[in-house]
Amino acid sequence: MKEATAIFRKQVLDTRKNKTVLIQFVLFPIMTIVMSHAVKVDDMPEFFYLKLFSIMYMAMAPITSMSAIISEEKEKGTLRALMMSNVRPLSYLLGVGVYDFLACFIGTTVMSNFCGLDGGPWYKYLLVISSGLVISIVLGAAIGVLAKDQMSATSLSVPVMCLFTFLPMMAQFNDTIASVAKFFYTQQLYLALEDINNVKIGTEGLIITLVNALVIIGFFVVAFRKEGLTKE
Amino acid sequence: MISVTGISKSFGGKKVLDDISFSVEDGEIFGLLGPSGAGKTTLIRVLTGQLRFEEGEAMVMGKKVTQLTGSDKKQFGVMMDDFGLYERLSCYQNLRVFADIYGVSDAAIREVLSEVKLQDAEKKAVSKLSKGMKERLRLARALLSRPKVLFLDEPTSGLDPQTSSEIHEIIKKRKDAGTIIFLTTHNMTEAEKLCDHLVLLNEGHIVESGAPKELCLRYDHQKRIEVEKKDGEVISMEVDPKSVDTTAEKIADLLRSGHLETIHSKEPNLETVFMELTGRELEV
C-alpha cells in the first residue's frame, strides 16, 4: 500500500508538469461546459453535449493517459528503478490506475455539475461513467504494458480509443454502425444515459458491458504475462 | 558478502556469462573490469535478481539471488545507466518518490543531496541538469536507503574528471562506512584508484583476478626500471638478480654525477595486462 501511495503521489506531481497527460484530463470537461452553455439549438435534447462528451471522455482520457504513463516509464527506465526498489507490479498499476480514475472522476463530476446535473440522476450518471472509466483504465493499462515505448503506445492506443470513442457518436446517424456499436461498452453506457434523468441499463446492456470488461481484463492478463512491466 | 559460483547465462544461444566464480568480502570495493559487451551489466542484473541464469549459484547477503525477497532488495542500492530519472520532476521530488517507497525521512533526502553536492539544485527539474549532475542524482537515489550493498554500473562513464573524482570520493566514504561496493567499469584508472579486488572480464569469461597492484606485478615479465637523465635521455635498465650489480652501479654513477632526473619502475598497467591476456583494449 505504501508503494502504491508513493506512485500515486509521484503521478500527481508529474501530471502538473506533463501537459500531454494533463490536457487529456481537462480538455473534454472544458469543452463540455463551454459547448453546453454557448451552443444552444432548438429541439436539442437535454444534456446533449454532456451525454456525448462524457462517453468520449470516459473512453479517450483513461486509454490514452494510462498507456502514455506506463509506456513512458518503460521507455525512460524509471519503471526498472521502481521495480528494483521493490515496487510490485500490482502496487504500481494500482497507484497509476487510482490516480487516473480520480483525475477522470473529478473531470466528470465537475463537467456534469456545471451542466446542471444534480441529485439522484447525478449519482447514477457518475456510477455509469465510473464503471466505464474502470474498463477504459484496464484497457489503457494493457496497451501500456504491451507497448515498448511511447511511440508504439500511441500507435496502439489511437485506433482503439477512436473505435470506442466515436462509435456511439456515429451510431446515432447510421443504423448499420449502431448494430455493430451495440456490442461495445461505450455504446451500452451511452444508451444507459439516453434519458439522463432516468438512468437505466437493461439486462442486455449489462451483459454486454460485463462481457466487454471480462474480455478487456483477459487482454490485460495476456499482455502482462507476455511482456510484464519490465522485460528481462 | 557476495559469492558467485559457476554462473552461466545465455541470450539466444550465445553465452554471455560462462562459468563465473568470485567472492566479495564485506566493506570491500569489488571491481569488474572489462570492455563493452564483456558481460558486466548482465552480471549486475543477475546479482540483483533482475535476470535469471541457467547454471551456477549466486548468493548476496547470505541468500540465493533467486530467493531474494522485496525487503532483501531494499538493502541494495543500484545505479544503472538504464534506470531513468523523472525528467519533469525536481531532484528533490525524484528522491521523494523513492523515499516514500523506502520509508526514508525528509532529512535523509537532504543529507544525500548534500552528499552528492546537489543541495543547491534540489528544486531544479532533472531535464535541466547536466549529465554529471544527473549521474550524481542517480547515485543519490542508490544511496538513499543506506544500502548494505551498492551496485554501480559504470558510475563515471562519460563524465568529466572533476565529477568522476567527486563520485569516487562518495564511493570511498560509503566503503569506509562498511558498505559492500560492486562496481563495473572499463576505465582502468578508476579500477586502480578504487578497487580492493578486481576481476577482469572478457566475452563472458573471467580472464584474471586479484588486487590491482598484485595483478600488475604478476604480469611484470620484463622487470625493468626507467631512468631519465637531466639532459632528457631515457635509459631503460633490467632488474634481474644476475645483473643487479651492474644496474646498481649505473644508477649510483648517475646519482654521484648529479645527472639523475627521475627513476621509475616499469611494471605494466591494467590496460597492458588486459591486452596481454585477451589481445583486446579495455576502452572499447
Image (cartoon, grey):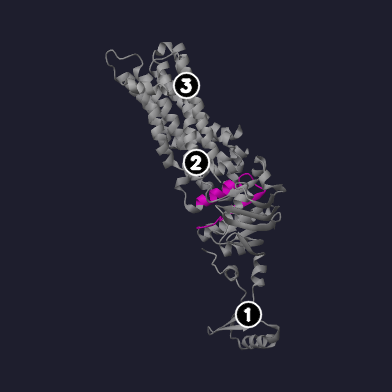
Instruction: Using the image, determine if residue A227 lies above or below residue B117.
Output: above
| Residue B202: in magenta span | no
Query: Which amino acid type is shown beneath numbered disc 2?
Result: Glu
Considering depth in this image, is A170 or B252 the residue closer to the camera?
A: A170
Instruction: Using the image, determine if residue A221 lies above or below residue B75.
Output: above
Circle 2 residue: A73
Write the residue at 50% across / 50% down.
B134
Place of residue B240 in the rendered image (x, y in percent of width and height, measured from the top left): 68, 82
How far apart in space, not on screen, are marks 1 and 2 (Cα)?
A: 55 Å
Q: Would you call the spot at circle 1 few (<14 residues within 10 Å), some (14-19), or many (20 or more)?
A: some
Q: Secondary structure at mark 1?
A: strand
Circle 3 residue: A209
Considering depth in this image, is A150 or A39 the residue closer to the camera?
A: A150
Q: Which residues are magenta?
A: B133-158
For residue B44, side relative to residue A24 (left or right): right
Q: Secondary structure at mark 3?
A: helix
Letter of the chain that mark 3 sits on in the rendering: A
Considering depth in this image, is B86 or A183 the residue closer to the camera?
A: A183
Do the numbered discs 3 and 2 sit on residues whose CB atoms are within 8 Å? Answer: no
Letter of the chain that mark 2 sits on in the rendering: A
Instruction: Using the image, determine if residue A187 lies above or below residue A229.
Output: above
Query: Which amino acid type is shown beneath numbered disc 1?
Result: Arg
Circle 1 residue: B224
Do the numbered discs 1 and 2 sit on residues whose CB atoms are within 8 Å? Answer: no
Disc sitting over residue A72 in the figure: none
Query: Which amino acid type is shown beneath numbered disc 3?
Result: Thr
Residue A25 makes an appearance in the image: no
Write the residue at 63% across / 56% down.
B172
Letter of the chain that mark 1 sits on in the rendering: B
Q: Where on the picture, by quarter, is residue A3?
A: top right
How far apart in space, not on screen, are marks 3 and 2 (Cα)?
A: 30 Å
Q: Is the residue at mark 3 from the same chain as the one at mark 2?
A: yes
